[in-house]
Image (spheres, rainbow, N blue to C red):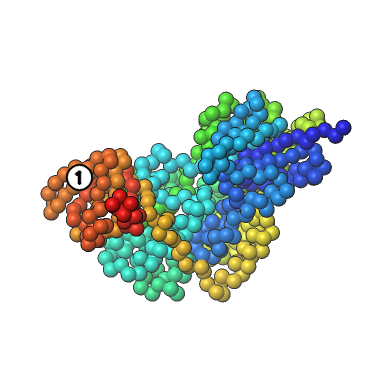
């Protein structure tokens, strides 16, 4: 009698799971294993090309691969991972539609849940910054950048104009620098061809980097590459501020640890990684960073059927230390985990992880890049070509490889996609944060939003005279929204202030519903 297939469940649909599943395909066809993949999104985001999506070189859909195509023929479950019972060997998921629970049994569990943004320790940063991990955030930032150029093109006030055209990027790592250089190239293109009202020199791009040198992924092994990057960046509108990091953020400013305040409507966070809150429920060993500790075979320490790799795992590196949170390591870990699961099934000795690194690269825009391959550094146009070859190679499905290649080939001739797909619904409600002493609204200015306080205290002024105080649960700004559109008073924060901002369209709907 044929044995039932071994049930493998994968948490997360990232690089680790994609490559684990590919390595298991033959065993799946033979009926040796049965694989289920669980993720709250039914797509995979290829983060290597995010900067080109933000700046209109690529269509947003180019970096998104449908999970149903990636895991064709497998059991894919689109739901939230609520809990894992290691003793019962069950995963509980909830349906995003209504929270209905489902249980999935496993014999082996592969944990490849990546990492999340860790912004909670910086006041206002989670409310007032754009992040690049989630696809909706990438699309929102893309639309926001284009819209700011539209707004600035008709703005006459110099201070307001500067605020609209200042972009602050937190992090001088690969991700931060790639966004900065692509944004600079984008600004040059927009101001030259589409926005004659705006000068290229008006656009400010400020990179806040907490270290003494950018691109820390290079370490101190490649001083020549670092020198090359600094030289090329120095010829742009990008200003790098070393040993400086974001301390807090408001809708109109970024404050740094040096006490500086930068007026801006755009803060892009490329720093801060945290692990899934789900891990706090588990009685497993963890690294001080919060990552799951594994042995040399990618098993969770002390567990025979629980495996982890990628950003969420502290897996030993063959040369000492731990594997860095890079996509290539997650890919290789996925392959190694699948092989070791099959070895476990066949009762063979497990194989240790041997991959020590391939190299990496960082684009500097304008057909330039830098990188190293097996320790050999290279830069300029050859590095840019190599970078694109690697991006093409690691796009997960052929459909996206073809679409991306077509966009790469045609955009220099037909131009970038510069339409903003922002909708009123996206703008209806936002969470905002203000530092003490900052003005939320100003008497006499135009306004189309009202506010509800959910933390902190504010003072109301008319003609520079305080006329009242506002605290949690109070609201303001409705007079301008429902009246002539002019603010009748100034509201200034007295403490750290958190608000809900509600747009005019939704305010009118609420008013109508309450009448």
> Regarding mark 1 in the picture, which secondary structure is present there?
strand
Provide residue 364's location: percent of width, then percent of height.
53, 60
As drawn, is 416 to the left or to the right of 407?
left
Compared with residue 404, is residue 512 higher up or lower down, i.e. above or below? above
Tally of numbered discs: 1
Q: Which residue is mark 1?
A: 459
Residue at image point 30% right, 50% down: 514
- Classify residue 278 by image quadrant: top right
Compared with residue 470, is residue 292 higher up or lower down, i.e. above or below? above
Provide residue 59's location: percent of width, then percent of height.
55, 63
As drawn, is 256 to the left or to the right of 9?
left
Residue at image point 38% right, 74% down: 196
The residue furthest front is 515
The N terminus is located in which quarter? Answer: top right
- Classify residue 352 by image quadrant: top right
The residue furthest right is 1
Q: Is residue 456 visible?
A: no
Which of 109/249 is in front? 109
Provide residue 494's location: percent of width, then percent of height.
23, 42
Which of 81/186 is in front? 81
As drawn, is 162 to the left or to the right of 45?
left
Q: Is residue 272 visible?
A: yes
Residue at image point 38% right, 67% down: 150
Classify mark 1: residues with Cα within 10 Å, few (<14), some (14-19) or many (20+).
some
Residue at image point 52% right, 49% down: 133
Compared with residue 360, is residue 190 higher up or lower down, i.e. above or below? below
Provide residue 62's location: percent of width, then percent of height.
59, 60
Which of 92/376 is in front? 92
Which of 391/21 is in front? 21
């Amino acid at each position: 009698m044929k044995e039932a297939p071994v049930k493998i469940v994968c948490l997360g649909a990232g690089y680790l799971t994609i490559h684990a599943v590919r390595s298991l395909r033959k065993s799946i066809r033979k009926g040796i294993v049965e694989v289920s993949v669980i993720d709250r999104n039914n797509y995979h985001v290829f983060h290597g090309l995010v900067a080109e999506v933000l700046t209109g070189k690529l269509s947003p859909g180019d970096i998104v691969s449908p999970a149903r195509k990636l895991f064709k023929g497998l059991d894919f479950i689109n739901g939230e991972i609520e809990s894992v019972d290691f003793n019962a060997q069950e995963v509980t998921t909830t349906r995003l539609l209504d929270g209905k629970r489902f249980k999935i049994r496993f014999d082996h569990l592969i944990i490849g849940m990546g990492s999340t943004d860790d912004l909670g320790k910086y006041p206002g940063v989670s409310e007032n910054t754009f992040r690049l991990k989630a696809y909706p955030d990438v699309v929102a930032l893309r639309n926001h950048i284009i819209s700011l150029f539209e707004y600035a093109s008709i703005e006459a006030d110099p201070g307001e104009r500067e605020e609209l055209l200042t972009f602050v990027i937190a992090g001088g790592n690969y991700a931060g620098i790639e966004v900065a250089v692509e944004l600079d190239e984008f600004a040059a293109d927009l101001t030259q061809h589409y926005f004659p009202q705006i000068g290229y020199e008006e656009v400010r791009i400020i990179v806040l980097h907490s270290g003494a040198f950018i691109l820390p992924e290079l370490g101190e092994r490649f001083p020549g590459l670092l020198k090359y990057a600094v030289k090329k960046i120095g010829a742009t509108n990008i200003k790098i501020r070393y040993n400086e990091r974001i301390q807090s953020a408001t809708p109109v400013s970024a404050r740094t640890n040096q006490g500086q305040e930068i007026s801006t409507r755009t803060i892009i966070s490329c720093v801060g990684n945290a692990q899934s809150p789900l891990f706090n429920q588990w009685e497993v060993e963890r690294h001080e960073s919060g990552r799951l500790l594994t042995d040399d075979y990618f098993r969770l320490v002390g567990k025979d059927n629980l495996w982890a790799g990628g950003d969420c795992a502290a897996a030993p590196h063959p040369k000492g230390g731990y594997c860095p949170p890079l996509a290539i390591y997650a890919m290789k870990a996925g392959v190694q985990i699948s092989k070791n699961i099959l070895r476990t099934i066949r009762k063979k000795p497990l194989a240790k992880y041997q991959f020590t690194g391939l190299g990496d690269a960082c684009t500097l825009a304008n057909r330039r890049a830098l990188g190293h391959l097996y320790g050999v550094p290279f830069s300029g146009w050859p590095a840019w070509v190599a970078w694109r070859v690697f991006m093409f190679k690691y796009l997960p499905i052929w459909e996206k490889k073809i679409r991306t290649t077509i966009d790469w080939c045609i955009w220099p001739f037909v131009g970038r996609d510069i339409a903003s797909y922002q909708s009123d619904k996206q703008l209806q409600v936002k969470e905002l944060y203000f530092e003490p002493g900052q003005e939320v609204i100003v008497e006499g200015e135009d306004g189309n939003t009202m506010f509800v306080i959910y933390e902190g205290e504010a003072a109301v002024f008319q003609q520079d005279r305080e006329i009242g105080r506002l605290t949690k649960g109070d609201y303001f700004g409705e007079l301008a929204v429902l009246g002539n559109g002019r603010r009748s008073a100034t509201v200034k924060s007295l403490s750290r202030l958190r608000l809900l901002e509600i747009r005019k369209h939704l305010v009118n709907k609420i008013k109508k519903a309450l009448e």
